Amino acid sequence: MNKTNVRSRRSFWQEWDLIQAFGQRDLKSKFKGTALGWLWSLVVPLASLGIYTLIFGGLFKMVPATIASRHEGIGIFAVWLFAGLTIWGFFQNSINAGINGLLGSGGLLQKVYFPAYSAVLGSCLAIGVQSAIEVGLLLAVLLCLTNVSWTWLLLVPFLLLLVVFTGAISVILSIWNIYVRDLAHLVGVFLQLMFYATPIIYNPDIVPESVWGLPAHDLIQAMPMAQFISLFRSLVYSLQPGTIGDWLSCCVWAGIALVGAVLVFRRWGADLGERI
């Protein structure tokens, strides 16, 4: 019987305990030995929020979308920005953690076989716990502002789509990085560019319809993370359920990423022990 066939029999759900083990490992080591411990999971994003709010909300007077609980056409920039930073932070940190998680498991992978995606998704799981804390803080602030509606219930399918999309992209890039080690550096640069290209710290309404003959506004709005962030803000900030087009776009991006991850794993990720 072929050794590869034996390895491929275990399904994703059969590997779930291993994914959780990798996630718990990352969680325990993340803030080990620090004075503030898990408080650092809030200090860093809140510090970023304060800086961006001061610069773009205070200095550049960026106008956010209107928050649903205010009927005077008023938006709260810090809350609107925090919603965007939370989703982007989960995406960016998951990719970086997934790449490092697979590389860091190289010694173990050389001794015993396990699917490469287990280490990647375990790292993403650890990041997800931190992001869940941030989402909880955001919802608590919105609750204090009485900005609550039934649209919050739609967070369950939304977060599922986001996790599938982010996890799949993390698996793809983490496996490819084993073959092309420069990829991690290129991904870092690309994510930095994408952060400013995605309407996170600015309202997409300020983007002109056309720049240099290109449909700039439509291109920015069509980016996957722009659509995920826009839908999340609709659900929790504007208290709108989002359009069918919004949900369909997120479903399509998640589906494409998932199929891509399966193909990449089967083609390049079967046995990475020797390459790592």
Image: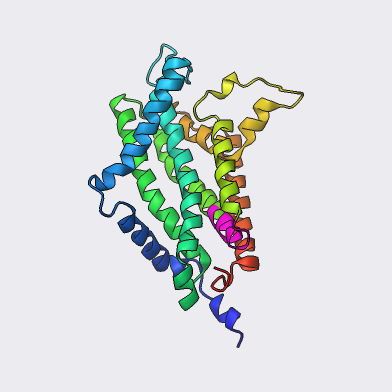
Q: Quadrant of the N terminus?
A: bottom right
* Residue farthest along the left direction in this orientation: 35
Question: Is 205 located above or below residue 23 in the figure?
Answer: above
Question: Is 226 located above or below residue 104 in the figure?
Answer: above
Which residue is at the front of the view, 149 or 133?
A: 133
Tell whether 107 sits left or right of 224.
left
Tell whether 58 sits left or right of 1.
left
Which residue is at the front of the view, 147 or 176?
A: 176
Residue in the picture at 63% in, 51% down: 256
Q: Quadrant of the C terminus?
A: bottom right
**Is residue 154 at least partly visible in the picture?**
no
Q: Quadrant of residue 171?
A: bottom right
* Residue farthest along the bottom direction in this orientation: 1
Part of the protein shown in magenta: 170-181
- Please tell me whether residue 73 belongs to the stretch shown in magenta: no
Q: Quadrant of residue 19?
A: bottom left
Residue in the picture at 55% in, 58% down: 174
Question: Is 219 located above or below residue 40 in the figure?
Answer: above
> Residue 242: image x %, image y %?
52, 32
Residue in the picture at 48% in, 30% down: 234
**Is residue 34 at least partly visible in the picture?**
yes
> Residue 239: image x %, image y %?
43, 28
